[in-house]
Amino acid sequence: MSERVLDVENLSIKIPVIGGMLHAVDNISLHVERGETLCIVGESGCGKSLTSLAIMDLLPKKAIRTVDKMSLSDADILNFSEKQMSNVRGNKMGMIFQEPMSSLNPSFTVENQMLETLSRHRNIVGSKAKALVVQMLEKVGITPAEKRLRQYPHQLSGGLRQRVMIAMTLLCEPELIIADEPTTALDVTIQAQILKLMKDLQNDFNVGLIFITHDLGVVANIADRVAVMYAGQIVEEGSVYDIFDSPSHPYTRGLLSCIPVPGKIKRGEPLGSIPGMVPSLVGDFSGCRFSGRWSVADEQLEGADIRLVAVPDESNTFKVNGSETHLVRFCCQDCLKKSYNSDRRKAN
Amino acid sequence: MLYYTLKRLALAALVALTVSFISFGLLYLSSDPAIAMAGETASDADIEAIRQLYGFDRPILVQYFDWLQRAAAGDLGKSYYFRTDVSALIGERLPTTMTLGVCAITFAILLSVPLGVAAAIRPNSIIDRIALFLSVMGQALPSFWFALMLIVFLSVSLRLLPTSGSDTWLHFVMPTVVLGYYAAPAIMRLTRTGMLEVLSTDYIRTARAKGLRPPVVLFKHALRNAIIPVVSLAAVQFGFMLGGSIVVETIFALHGAGFLAWESITRNDLPTVQGLILVFSLFYIVLTFFADLINAWLDPRIRIK
Amino acid sequence: MSNENIATTAVTKASIYTRFTGHQGVMIGAFIVIAIVVVALFAPVLAPHDPYHQNLLTRLIPPVWDSRGSWEHVLGTDHLGRDYFSRLIYGARISLLIGFGAALISGLIGTIMGVMAGYFGGRVDMVVTFLITVRLSMPVVLVALAVVAIVGGSLQVVISVLGLLLWDRFAVVMRSSTLQIRSMDYVAAAQAVGCSTKRILMTEIMPNVVNNLIVIATLEMAHAIILEAALSFLGLGVQPPLPSWGLMVSEGKDMMLFEPWLITIPGVALFLLVLAINLMGDGVRDITAPENRN
């Protein structure tokens, strides 16, 4: 029996910059169930990190967040005051960041930094708290825990630090964890270990996980559902199988074609890539966000066995092959026309 | 950490030696130290007596090593003007200056650290502008003039504080302010810059993401890291206060080492001047040495491995 | 350009001129400094009286805003009947001369040492760093006082002593700037092409460290001016009857309770000059190298 841990509707983030207003994130909606992993995929600058900060209400002061609905399990955190939000952060909702090297305070021991979470949210101190911390460190695979407790962050490797971060986030048994590219800065072998660890822990604690990444290999590994972000919008979402089996948005297809698969790609053939650059989203952006980014691979969309059914009340949004959960979104009519000729589109 | 300390110690010793040589040599800038000390009205016999007494007729290097040897044993010679041992003289006056210095640096820190923190929390706000304004003003204010203005207003117009002497703690109020305010701008700016940097680090973001309360984030996590360079600066500024104490003590007639410096310089009491330069320099050296150590100790990245 | 880049990059492509005129601090500072320089240059023309002329009949006349004052002596007279306004104007010359002179000498010494240390590294660097540490360990005020006492006080002596003592910041900053520049590619390119050391120093390194040099020069100028004022105040700087502002304060302090203008006027002048120079220095730093703020 899964319950919805996070529900976000129509989140937009605008940042005033020199030159106008940057529309960093444009009307996106997300939801995560308990025990489920939602992967947000996209290239640098698409707004995925800002989205996670928006959920935690940790955006920089200049940023303007507008959202219709934001609830954590049953709590409506949209209108929470800063005080209420600080009770939620680290407690019901935790976050793991990309750079383990700099995410821990260099002046305090591991023990100190972990204990303060417990004393802040659960009022547990002393030996009882220490026992819990030791237990958690062992759960994330750090043994001997006692030795590491007394150490300072600079004495730990990147992988160890990330484990500490994970342990710290799990201490109060949160309902939701947002992980912003937690393995990007680690070696590939360590990456694999950490991913497995996170997946195991998710099962143990039945926590909802939002995993942000630009690496589709990681997505294939751990995701239950996927949301593909491009230029501040979610262009495609669905289960991990849907996305990999029938990618419906040219951007998704482009991302997939970028992964060189040994065997499939011939020597001497150019690696797949998405041409062009992310457009500037400053000012009243009304043009096609995807212009200039079409590639040869996308021509094949015509031949793909994809049926689109329009979703009422949402412009340019379609259900793929009739599925309620697999949706694709186009920024404008041009993109739609270029992707699919009118035979493929069936009005509702 | 031990190796670091030893290295620093060796360097400090070398610097001390060099400074001692320079401060010794400075006094031979005058063509004849004996005449300088005796004064213009002294007779030839007097001058010769001084020359013999202080051994000015020997080669300079011999004089230096002799002086160094005795200085290492604590004997800084005899003051010509005060007719006592220089070491005793300095020893008697130094506590007053130290007291003044400690009060002054405390005053400076209590004034500038909170201001710097407040300015960093709200950059470009009113308080930030006030802090920067005060720091710019403070750096342009000549201390001797500030002292006189304070005397005119507080002692004379308002009759709040005594003008001179060192009997009660009230006598130390104005000197503390005059000596301390000059260190405040630098400390404020460093605190502000340090806090601004630290507040934008990843680990502060983590602290917020953990739901820690703002005072905890600010004081436990941020300030702890931002304060490290400030401690060094405060130690160095404390060292500078010895120089500043000359002006302050002279204006307020506080009988400390700074006043002694002025007295002995204006009376060409060379042995005392030599002794003072040495003592002041050694003090700086020791102070910066400890500042380095504290700096290293405060940062676990240097302290451990 | 990605969105994050837009958000963090300053779009100003304004020229140096525009950035200067737009910076409040620099403009105010420059205006005051230029005004004082002009006044000092045209002192003989602007001063209504001879600053050295004593007249015991006209001693201690208050400035014009006091009821007993008059326009004859706009800023009053001192204890020897000398016109304060004229002395103030000529005093500007002294402060400016000290400032420029000391900054020039210390700038030369410090820059040469710093650039050598930064460029050649190794032993040279070690020696220079050691010398800087030695210099920093010496109490400047005390040493300056002692030297002036021994050698005798005069304008030249003060400029020389301050010049020989205030080079440390120049050395430190020039050294780190040079180190920074030296590691950049275009220096390596020049070396690869075979340029002589001297040529590299002149054409590659110097133009790029000039910003920092200007900033430090202004700060040390202000520092020298304040120091000279303090030395003269203590009687061990410029000697009477020269109208050094510090000396004027010292001469006036015995009468400061009843004739406060004697100390307020030169004090304010000092404060303004030093403030203006500091504003300029800060401003130049803000414009050319905001990352060095401290």
Image (tube, rainbow, N blue to C red):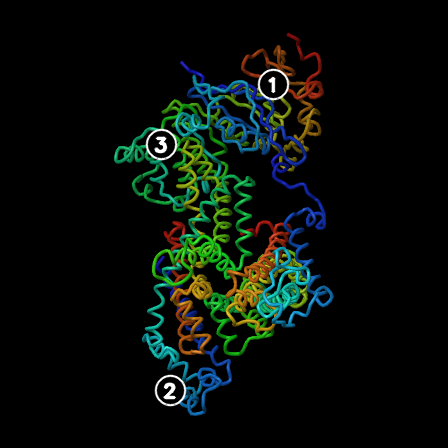
Q: Position of residue A66 (x, y in %)?
A: 56, 23
To which residue does mark 2 refer?
Answer: B53
Residue B121, relative to residue C41: is it above or below? above
To which residue does mark 3 refer?
Answer: A120
Front residue of C269 and C138: C269
Q: Earlier in the sequence, mark 3 or mark 1?
A: 3
Front residue of A58 and C63: C63
Q: CA distance from mark 3 to mark 2?
A: 73 Å
Specify whether B32 is left or right of A16. left
Q: Position of residue A346 (x, y in %)?
A: 66, 9
> Which secondary structure, mark 2?
helix
Residue at position x 63%, y 26% from top? A251
The chain letter for the residue carrying disc 1 is A
Local packing at callout 3 (Cα closer than 10 Å; few below 14, some 14-19, many 20+) is some
> Which secondary structure, mark 1?
strand
Q: Using the rendered view, name the quadrant where residue A25 is placed.
A: top right
Amino acid tagged 1:
Val
To which residue does mark 1 refer?
Answer: A328
